[in-house]
Each structure stands twice: as structure tokens, then as C-alpha cells.
Amino acid sequence: MKVYNGLLFVFLICFSLMKSDALAADIKIESQPSEVEIFIQSDANEKPNLIGKTPFKQDLDQLIASYVKSNSFIISMKKKGYENYNVLFTKTSSVDVNLTVNLKVDPKISKIIDHDNLMMALFNVQKLIRGRNITDAIKQLDELEKKYKDFSIVAELKATAYYMNKDVENALAYYRRAFALNSGNIDAYKMKVYLEKKLGVFSDI
């Protein structure tokens, strides 16, 4: 990693420099996903110049002559929904540059996708419970609980599955857990109180 004028730059995956026998040098950039915008700037304080999209190939010496005014330059790669990638270069001559980049999905987008996947999984579990396929519902909830152990809705659905399966003790344990995770979960609270009265047990939760 390098710090350039207070900004952090990370050398990209599969960055390689290969000596060229020809006088001219090329810069070649490929990415996953494709159609990533590529920018060049002489330093971090200069406005970036858009030079193309991936897959990209151009004469490096010509690129430097057109845009680079100092002894180093920055190549930036940007695509909506993905984290930006930046790499700092020093001027070279007769050296081919090959970059292969795998952009990471923006954490905000990843979180949205993760929540969407959870909602779809919970919807499928509800369908299984309504169809009285309790065994498969509990198996899926076991897997969801590993990843979303602090989600009240997962515990509540698991409690409901146990209750539908006439496993009242486990149902109560999970209704208690659901309410403990979210004191605003009124449905879990009502079922917790109901089952405690039915079983003749009480708790401070």
C-alpha cells in the first residue's frame, strides 16, 4: 500500500510489468465486471481525466505525454455499485503494463443484496410452514440462524415452526429469544406469555 498526498492507494490484483522489446509500450487493463471507467491524473489534487472503459489498451508513452505532468501518475477505475480502485505509477519507458482487476461490490450494495436474500429465504420458510413442511422449515432456519443469529424474526419463525410441530418447550425457548433480541416484537411477546402460562413457567425476560 502507498499513501499519496494523504490518499491511500492499493496495488491491484495481478499487477505485472513486462519488459518490451519494441520501442513503444502499451498499457492494457481488463476487469471483472467489464465496462469499468478508467481515469488518469498527475496527482491526487488534479481533476481525473476519463480515458476509456475496460477492456482497455493504449500506447502508454502517448498517454503519459497527453496527461502526465509529473514523475508519477494515478490510474483510477470506477463503476457504480462497486468500490473504486486506484494505483500509483512512476513514469517508465518501453515497459508494457498489464492490469487485471476484480472490483469489489460496494459494501452498501452488498448489505442491500444480503437483506434481499434474507427476505427471500424467510418467505420460503413461511411457505414451508404454511404447507406444514415443518422439518424442512426448521432445517432452513437452522442455516439462517448461523448467519443471522441476532435477528429476532429468525428466532420468531423458528419458534412458530416448533409450535406448529407441537414442540412447545422449544417454541417457548425461541419466542423468548425473539423477544430478548427485540423488545418491540409484540407477537413474540404474546406467544411467550401464552406458552409460559400454558406450561406453568415464568421468566424475567
Image: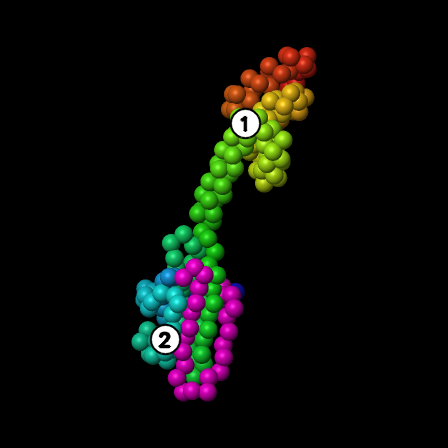
Q: Is residue 9 left or right of residue 169?
A: left
* Lower sequence index among marks 2 and 1: 2
Q: Is residue 22 magenta?
A: yes
Q: Is residue 190 visible?
A: yes
Q: Which three-letter amino acid code belongs to the residue tagged 1?
A: Gly
What residue is shown at x 46% (from left), y 73% (from top)? 98
Q: Is residue 153 visible?
A: no
What residue is shown at x 38% (from left), y 57% (from top)? 79
Image: 87 above or below 104: below
The disc label shown at residue 58, or none: 2
Q: Which residue is mark 1?
A: 131
> Range of the magenta residues?
9-34
What residue is shown at x 45% (from left), y 81% (from top)? 95
Circles 2 and 1: CB distance less than 8 Å?
no
The image quadrant that residue 194 belongs to is top right
Identify the element where label 2 is drawn.
Answer: strand
Identify the element where label 1 is drawn.
Answer: loop
* Image location of residue 177, percent across then percent down: 61, 27
Q: Nearer the viewer, mark 2 or mark 1?
A: 1
Which residue is nearer to you in this view: 125 or 198? 125
CA–CA distance in space, label 2 to label 1:
60 Å
Q: Is residue 157 left or right of residue 49?
A: right
Circle 1 crowding by C-alpha within 10 Å: few under 14, some 14–19, many from 20: few
Which residue is nearer to you in this view: 46 or 95? 95
Image: 181 above or below 58: above
